[in-house]
Image: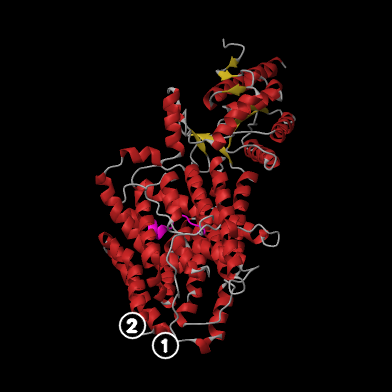
């Protein structure tokens, strides 16, 4: 005999209080990784110390740091600095910002990340995708040639908004929102953006003076051919030489991974050679434009340029929100990828806080949006970095560049920057991944292509929205049409989907169904109709064998939760089945589901004796009832 709170081993204890349930749900939603497990059973002083180390990771790794580790970080830091200089200038020009801002953006943010970042591999810097997104959004209101100071100020404002949003997402543990950018979406978005950026570099490669502010393929190609009288063969020749050299360096790295440094230093070689070429041969006189004057000095404060004017707030909000999500998805995904190579884990929410803080501080010190670009992070990893100190070394190298070398980079030909950007972008068009999606999942491939073609032929934000929209439609379809299956026996204790295992046996007089998702208002009608359809089909099959269904056994192990609409659906289903003399049996309802069924008195209606721990126990009890019923019927026939 079981206790009053149990029958058949099933727990019918009174439901937990609202506060207990709310606390458990919030903990599972916001703290699924249980980040504070190390704080348990510790003294107050130890908790305070671990709390500081948790929220400020540099306090954890710096006390253990030594010269042996610094040797590796020094090499890695210098290597990524050699990549940061040309990339900083290139991506600033891509965003039509003063090139010096690109160098500023590789000085302050890496220092902030070294303090708060949890990934030892992530190398901080600007990225082409976010540079173009911000430029496209802000240029809807202000053109750089009309008012450069206002244009730059709006970039800082968008960066500040992006940083505040990123920090808030991390503080409030809302990192799961970034998961709505699926892998397929990111693949297509990055590929489409790379294609657009590559085509835009034709302006620099051909020496064009007039161009379009639109980013889609049609407008860009139209601008290229409409201005073909401006094409400069000197720029084209120099550009092809530089691009060929950069692609060869990437080929060498691919074939010989140990020679990763060849690809890492190739951009700075292009810049140095380009500067010497422009200086010695007076390239401007031959139609090859250069960057122009770069002033020495460290980042000036930019608080006075932050602009929340109602006239511009819509564009900076749009730019800030979109780039916040894109840069977080890219930075966290890249950080996790490289950490997994060393069997390590990073906290996504802490990464959000770190990236957000570096963008907040950056926006106030003449920097625009930064995150962890793949190319720089890969170089940092391959160079053997051991900690976040490599970002500090890179930052110090950028400081020396800003104080002493910046004017020299003013001779950099724009065609050299175009070649650097184009070479980097070609590596982001992942044909193999797209083909893999096509072979394995056609819907994921459709999501990927929506992002790719949306970005390429409409706009970057529309491409992103189309892809995310398709991904959400797919998720809603899973919610609205949850999986159900009929179970059969393979052995006495193994129950499997009869569609997957056609040889499985059916139990006479019983229909066993497995429900595989929560029962909510979007899918409750479907669940009811699907159950009744299973019963109808089974009865049609069984009637041909002169054997009727008397028990419907529902395996609730996969039903993680249920709402009131779902409970009402169960009541309606029971009434429909009762009219056909079929009784519902529940198996293994989970805690939250059981509590809801008890509170709504559904358990009282079907009876506690109709709830079991396992399918085997339910079948055994139902079979005994079927045998007893058959014996009674035979006796009645004999008496008659």
**Residue 322 image label:** none
Say which quadrant the N terminus sits in.
top right
* SS type, badge 1: helix
What residue sits right under mark 2 in the picture?
A: 280
Question: What is the span of residues highlighted in magenta in the rendered image?
Answer: 367-377
Q: Is residue 531 visible?
A: yes
Q: Is residue 375 covered in magenta?
A: yes
Picture quarter containing residue 6? top right
User: Are circles 1 and 2 on residues that touch, CB within 8 Å?
Assistant: no
Q: Residue beneath label 1, please?
A: 286
Q: Is residue 3 on the magenta stretch?
A: no
The residue lying toward the viewer, choosing from 16 and 202, is 202
Residue 237 drawn above or below residue 544: below
- Secondary structure that dominates the magenta span: loop
Percent across and percent down for residue 23 are 59, 28
- The percent coordinates of residue 39 (x first, y second) are 45, 28
| Mark earlier in primary sequence (1, 2) | 2
- The x and y percentages for residue 413 are 41, 77
Indicate left or right for 565 with 27 as reference. Answer: right
Distance (Cα) linking label 1 and label 2: 12 Å
Query: Which residue is situated farthest in the bottom direction here?
Result: 229
Please report the residue visible at 53 percent of the width from the left and 51 percent of the height from the top. 360
Front-most of 448 and 479? 448
Drawn side of residue 440 relative to residue 339, left or right:
right
């Amino acid at each position: 005999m079981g206790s009053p709170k149990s029958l058949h081993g099933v727990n019918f204890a009174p439901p937990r209080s609202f506060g207990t349930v709310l606390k458990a749900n919030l903990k599972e939603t916001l703290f699924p990784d249980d980040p504070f497990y190390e704080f348990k059973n510790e003294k107050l002083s130890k908790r305070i110390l671990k709390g500081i180390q948790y929220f400020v990771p540099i306090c954890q790794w710096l006390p253990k740091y030594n010269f042996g580790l610094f040797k590796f970080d020094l090499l890695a830091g210098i290597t990524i600095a050699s990549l940061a200089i040309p990339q900083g200038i290139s991506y600033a020009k891509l965003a039509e910002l003063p090139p010096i801002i690109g160098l500023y953006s590789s000085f302050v943010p890496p220092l902030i990340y070294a303090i708060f970042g949890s990934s030892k591999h992530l190398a901080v810097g600007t990225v082409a995708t976010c540079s173009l997104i911000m430029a496209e959004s802000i240029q809807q209101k202000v053109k750089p040639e009309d008012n450069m100071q206002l244009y730059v100020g709006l970039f800082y404002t968008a960066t500040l908004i992006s940083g505040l949003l990123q920090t808030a997402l991390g503080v409030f543990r809302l990192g799961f929102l970034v998961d709505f950018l699926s892998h397929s979406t990111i693949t297509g978005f990055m590929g489409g953006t790379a294609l657009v950026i590559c085509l835009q570099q034709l302006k620099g490669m051909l020496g064009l003076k007039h161009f379009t502010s639109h980013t889609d393929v049609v407008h860009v190609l139209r601008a290229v051919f409409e201005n073909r009288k401006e094409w400069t063969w000197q720029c084209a020749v120099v550009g092809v030489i530089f691009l060929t050299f950069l692609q060869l360096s990437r080929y060498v790295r691919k074939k010989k991974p140990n020679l990763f440094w060849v690809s890492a230093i190739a951009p700075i070689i292009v810049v140095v050679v380009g500067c010497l070429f422009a200086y010695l041969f007076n390239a401007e006189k031959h139609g090859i434009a250069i960057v122009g004057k770069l002033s020495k000095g460290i980042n000036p404060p930019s608080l006075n340029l932050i602009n929340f004017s109602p006239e511009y707030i819509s564009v900076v909000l749009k730019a800030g929100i979109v780039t916040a999500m894109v840069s977080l998805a890219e930075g966290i995904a890249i950080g996790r990828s490289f950490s997994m190579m060393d069997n390590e884990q990073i906290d996504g929410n802490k990464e959000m806080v770190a990236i957000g803080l570096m963008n907040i501080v950056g926006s106030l010190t003449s920097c625009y949006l930064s995150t962890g670009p793949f190319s720089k992070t890969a170089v940092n990893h391959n160079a053997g970095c051991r900690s976040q100190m490599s970002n500090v070394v890179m930052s110090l190298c950028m400081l020396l560049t800003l104080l002493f070398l910046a004017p020299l980079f003013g001779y950099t030909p724009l065609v050299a920057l175009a070649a650097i950007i184009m070479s980097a972008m070609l590596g982001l068009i992942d044909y193999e991944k797209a083909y893999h999606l096509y072979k394995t999942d056609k819907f994921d491939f459709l999501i990927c292509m929506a992002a790719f073609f949306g970005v390429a032929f409409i706009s970057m934000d529309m491409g992103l929205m189309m892809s995310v929209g398709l991904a959400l439609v797919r998720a809603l379809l899973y919610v609205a049409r949850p999986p159900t299956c009929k179970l059969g026996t393979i052995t006495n204790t193994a129950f499997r989907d009869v569609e997957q295992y056609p040889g499985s046996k059916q139990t006479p007089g019983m229909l066993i169904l497995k429900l595989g998702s929560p029962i909510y208002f979007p899918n409750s009608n479907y669940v009811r109709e699907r159950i009744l359809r299973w019963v109808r089909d089974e009865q049609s099959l069984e009637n041909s064998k002169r054997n009727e269904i008397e028990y419907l056994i529902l395996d609730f192990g996969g039903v993680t939760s249920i709402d009131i609409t779902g409970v009402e659906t169960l009541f309606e289903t029971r009434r429909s089945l009762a009219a056909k003399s079929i009784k519902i049996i529940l198996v293994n309802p989970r805690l939250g589901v059981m509590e809801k069924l008890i509170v709504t008195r559904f358990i009282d209606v079907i009876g506690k004796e109709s709830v079991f721990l396992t399918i085997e126990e339910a079948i055994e009890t139902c079979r005994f009832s079927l045998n007893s019923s058959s014996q009674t019927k035979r006796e009645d026939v004999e008496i008659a």
